[in-house]
Image: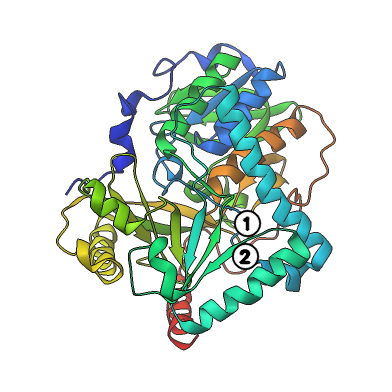
C-alpha cells in the first residue's frame, strides 16, 4: 500500500508541479502582494491579482498544492457544510437562499476558470448522491427536497431503497437523494493548472519556501522566509487547514481536522458499473460520514472522518483499516479488493462551520471551507484578491470581525470530545 495521495501519481513530475524555478529571486524587489499558501485559494488569488496588474509573489512551504488541495476526494459539491434546514434556521430564508446560491456561483466560477485556462483536470458534471443510513434519514430527505424547492428553487430527486441500485450497488442504505448540479475532477490536476495559470498571468511562485514570520509596519509587511526576506504592501494568508504560528490570529480561528482516504486497485468495468452506475460523487448521511467515488481508471476512492483528529502516520494507518472495513460493509463484493493507496490531509473548520474571507490584524485571509473547498476556495481566493486590488466588495462571506474560538490557541485539544459527541449523535439519530 502506497502512503501518499493517489492523485499525485496522475500528474507528471508532481514534486515540481509549479512552473517556476525552485527559489526565484523574490528578495530583489518589493511586491504589491505576498501570498502565503499554494493551494486553490492562494493560486486563484495570485492569478486574479496578477491579471489586474499587481506584482505578486506566492510562498508554499512544500510542493504547490500539497495540502488539502491535492489530497481531497475531488467532489465539487452544491451547498455549504451546513444543511439547508440549518441554514434557514440560523439565517432566515432570504439570507439562507443567498448563501446557498453562493455555492452555485462558486461552481460556475470554477467551471469558467477551468474552461478559460484549458485546465485538463477531468472535470465533469456527474451530480452527487447522498445515501440514507437509516429509514428516518430518508424521511428527512423528503423534508429537505420540499425545502430546497420552496426556499432555494433547487431540484433534487429521491430514489427509494427498492430502486437505489440504479444509483449505488449497495443494500446497506435506505434510499438516496440525487443532486445533478455537483461535479467531479482530479484535484491535483486542478492545482497544477491553477499554478500554471497564475504564472502565465505574471505571478511568481516560490515553492519549498516556508514563511516563518510576518511583521507589519506603516509601509507594509516584511516576511522572513526559509530563503530570505521579502517586503510587500499587502499579505494574503491562504493556509486554511495548515495555518501555523506565523499567523497566530488566523490559527485561533481555523481548526485543522483530518480527513482520510483509501483507493482500491483499478476495478473491472463491470464492477465499477455495479458500484456507482452513473459515476456520481457519493456520501452518506452520518456525521462520521463515508464519501466515495470512482477515479478515471476505475479505482474506488473511499474516505471519511475515520478519526476526529489531526493526521499522523499512525492515525492514517488506523484510519485506513477503518475505511477498509467500512468499504466492505458498503460494498461487500469489494471486500477482497486490493487497497493500493492510503493518505490523509487537513480540512479547516470554523466555529460556525461556514467559510470566511476578509482582513484580520491587517492581513487578508480566506478559508474555513469545512470540507467543501474545491469550488469555494477558488471562488473566495479570486474574490478577496479583487478586494486587495481596490474593489469595493460587499459579500455575505466577507468578515473582518471573525471571532476566535474560545480557549483555542492552535492545538485542537477538544477534538476527541467532539468526535465522541458526533458518534453518539450517529448512534441515536
Q: Residue at x 61, y 45 (%)?
A: 376
Where in the figure is residue 248, as x and y percent of width and height? 57, 50
Please name whichever residue, 270 or 414, is drawn nearer the observer in this view of the structure.
270
Q: Residue at x 65, y 39 (%)?
A: 108
* Number of marks drawn: 2
Q: Residue at x 62, y 23 (%)?
A: 231
Image quadrant in which you'd find residue 271? bottom left
Please name whichever residue, 87 or 234, is drawn nearer the observer in this view of the structure.
87
Image quadrant in which you'd find residue 173? bottom left
Q: Mark 2: few, some, or many residues within 10 Å (few <14, many ≥20)? A: some
Asked if residue 293 lies left or right of residue 125, the reply is left
| Residue 263 visible in the current orientation | no
Asked if residue 213 lies left or right of residue 340, the reply is right
Label 2 sits on a secondary structure element that is loop
Label 1 sits on a secondary structure element that is loop
Q: Is residue 139 above or below residue 383?
A: below
Where in the figure is residue 341, as x and y percent of width and height? 23, 48
Where in the figure is residue 176, as x and y percent of width and height? 48, 68
Where in the figure is residue 30, as x and y percent of width and height? 64, 16
Q: Mark 1: few, some, or many residues within 10 Å (few <14, many ≥20)? A: some
Foreground mark, 1 or 2, reads 1
Where is mark 1, residue-wise?
79
Q: Is residue 418 above or below residue 355?
A: below
Please name whichever residue, 269 or 127, is drawn nearer the observer in this view of the structure.
269
Q: Outermost residue toward the bottom?
A: 428
Where is mark 2, residue-wise?
82
**Between marks 1 and 2, how big is the CA–CA gap?**
8 Å
Pointer 1 and pointer 2: residues touching (CB < 8 Å)?
A: no
| Residue 178 visible in the current orientation | yes
Amino acid at each position: 500500500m502506497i502512503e501518499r495521495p493517489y492523485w499525485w501519481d496522475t500528474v507528471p513530475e508532481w514534486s515540481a508541479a509549479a512552473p517556476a524555478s525552485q527559489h526565484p529571486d523574490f528578495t530583489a524587489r518589493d511586491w504589491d502582494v505576498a501570498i502565503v499558501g499554494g493551494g486553490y485559494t492562494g493560486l486563484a488569488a495570485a492569478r486574479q491579482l496578477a491579471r489586474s496588474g499587481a506584482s505578486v509573489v506566492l510562498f508554499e512551504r512544500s510542493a504547490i498544492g500539497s495540502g488539502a488541495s491535492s489530497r481531497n476526494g475531488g467532489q465539487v459539491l452544491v451547498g455549504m457544510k451546513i444543511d439547508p434546514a440549518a441554514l434557514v434556521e440560523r439565517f432566515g430564508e432570504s439570507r439562507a437562499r443567498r448563501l446557498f446560491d453562493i455555492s452555485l456561483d462558486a461552481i460556475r466560477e470554477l467551471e469558467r476558470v477551468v474552461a478559460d485556462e484549458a485546465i485538463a483536470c477531468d472535470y465533469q458534471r456527474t451530480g452527487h448522491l447522498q445515501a440514507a443510513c437509516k429509514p428516518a434519514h430518508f424521511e428527512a430527505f423528503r423534508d429537505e427536497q420540499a425545502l430546497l424547492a420552496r426556499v432555494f428553487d433547487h431540484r433534487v430527486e429521491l430514489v427509494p431503497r427498492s430502486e437505489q441500485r440504479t444509483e449505488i450497488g449497495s443494500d446497506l442504505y435506505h434510499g438516496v437523494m440525487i443532486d445533478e448540479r455537483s461535479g467531479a475532477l482530479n484535484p491535483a490536476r486542478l492545482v497544477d493548472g491553477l499554478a500554471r495559470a497564475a504564472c502565465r498571468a505574471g505571478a511568481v511562485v516560490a515553492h519549498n519556501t516556508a514563511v516563518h514570520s510576518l511583521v507589519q509596519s506603516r509601509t507594509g509587511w516584511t516576511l522572513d522566509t526559509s530563503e530570505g526576506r521579502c517586503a510587500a504592501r499587502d499579505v494574503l494568508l491562504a493556509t486554511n487547514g495548515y495555518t501555523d504560528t506565523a499567523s497566530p490570529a488566523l490559527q485561533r480561528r481555523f481548526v485543522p481536522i483530518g480527513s482520510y482516504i483509501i483507493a482500491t486497485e483499478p476495478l473491472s468495468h463491470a464492477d465499477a458499473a455495479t458500484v456507482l452506475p452513473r459515476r456520481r460523487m457519493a456520501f452518506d448521511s452520518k456525521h462520521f460520514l463515508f464519501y466515495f467515488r470512482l477515479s478515471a481508471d476505475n479505482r474506488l476512492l473511499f474516505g471519511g472522518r475515520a478519526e476526529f483528529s489531526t493526521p499522523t502516520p499512525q492515525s492514517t494507518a488506523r484510519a485506513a483499516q477503518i475505511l477498509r472495513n467500512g468499504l466492505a460493509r458498503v460494498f461487500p463484493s469489494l471486500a477482497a479488493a486490493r487497497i493500493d493507496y492510503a493518505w490523509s490531509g487537513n480540512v479547516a473548520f470554523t466555529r460556525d462551520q461556514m467559510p470566511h474571507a476578509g482582513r484580520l490584524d491587517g492581513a487578508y485571509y480566506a478559508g474555513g471551507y469545512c470540507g467543501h473547498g474545491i469550488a469555494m476556495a477558488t471562488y473566495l481566493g479570486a474574490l478577496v484578491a479583487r478586494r486587495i486590488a481596490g474593489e469595493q466588495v460587499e459579500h455575505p462571506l466577507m468578515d473582518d470581525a471573525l471571532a476566535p474560538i474560545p480557549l483555542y490557541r492552535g492545538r485542537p485539544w477538544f477534538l476527541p470530545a467532539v468526535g465522541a459527541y458526533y458518534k453518539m449523535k450517529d448512534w441515536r439519530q
